[in-house]
Amino acid sequence: MPNEAASTDKRVTLIDKVFKDREGHFVLFEAPNLPLIAWFTMILLVYPLTGKVALLATIVARGALFTWAWLELFQGVNYFRRGLGLAVLIYIVWGSVVRGTFV
C-alpha cells in the first residue's frame, strides 16, 4: 500500500520549523503582549521627561524589553521568534555592558 504511506508522510521542512507554529500557521508577528506594550509606552514617555522620572521610565522600559525577549527566547512559537528574542537580549547586553548605555 504505497499510497497509504505517502499520504501519512508529513515532512517537517526548515521553513516549517522556522516560521510556523504548532498548528501550522505562518507566524512572523503577533499582537503585542504586555511587556512589549509597556516598553513602547515607557519609550514614548522618556523623551518629554527629565531627571529621576526619566531614569525610572528608562529602567522600566529596559526591564519590559528584557522580559519580552526572555519570554520569546524560551516560549516563542517558532525558531524565528526565539531567534528574535535572542537578538534583542544580545542587543540589551551589548548596549548595557559594552557601550555603557542603558537604552
Image (cartoon, helix red, strand yellow):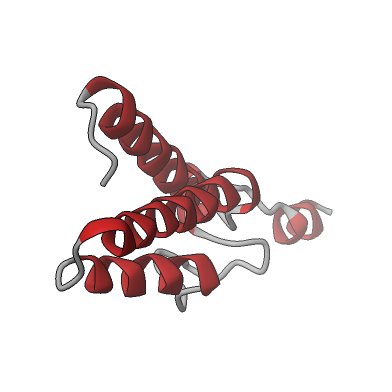
What residue is shown at x 50% (from left), y 65% (from top)? 35
Q: Position of residue 7 (x, y in %)?
A: 72, 61
Q: Where is residue 85 in the image (x, y as percent from the top left)?
A: 46, 46
Answer with left or right where residue 76 lies relative to residue 64. right
How many numbered marks appear? 0
Eyeballing the image, is 95 above or below 60?
above
What residue is shown at x 78% (from left), y 52% (from top)? 5
Quadrant housing the N terminus:
bottom right
Answer with left or right where residue 35 lies relative to residue 22. left
What residue is shown at x 32% (from left), y 23% (from top)? 97
What residue is shown at x 45% (from left), y 38% (from top)? 86
Residue sticking out furthest to the left: 48
Q: In which quarter of the image is residue 4?
A: bottom right
Residue sticking out furthest to the top: 98
Residue sticking out furthest to the right: 1
Evaluate whether residue 103 shows in this view.
Answer: yes
Is residue 11 or residue 40 the one in the foreground? Answer: 40
Q: Position of residue 77 (x, y in %)?
A: 59, 58
Residue sticking out furthest to the front: 51
Eyeballing the image, is 52 above or below 45?
above
Is residue 15 or residue 39 the one in the foreground? Answer: 39
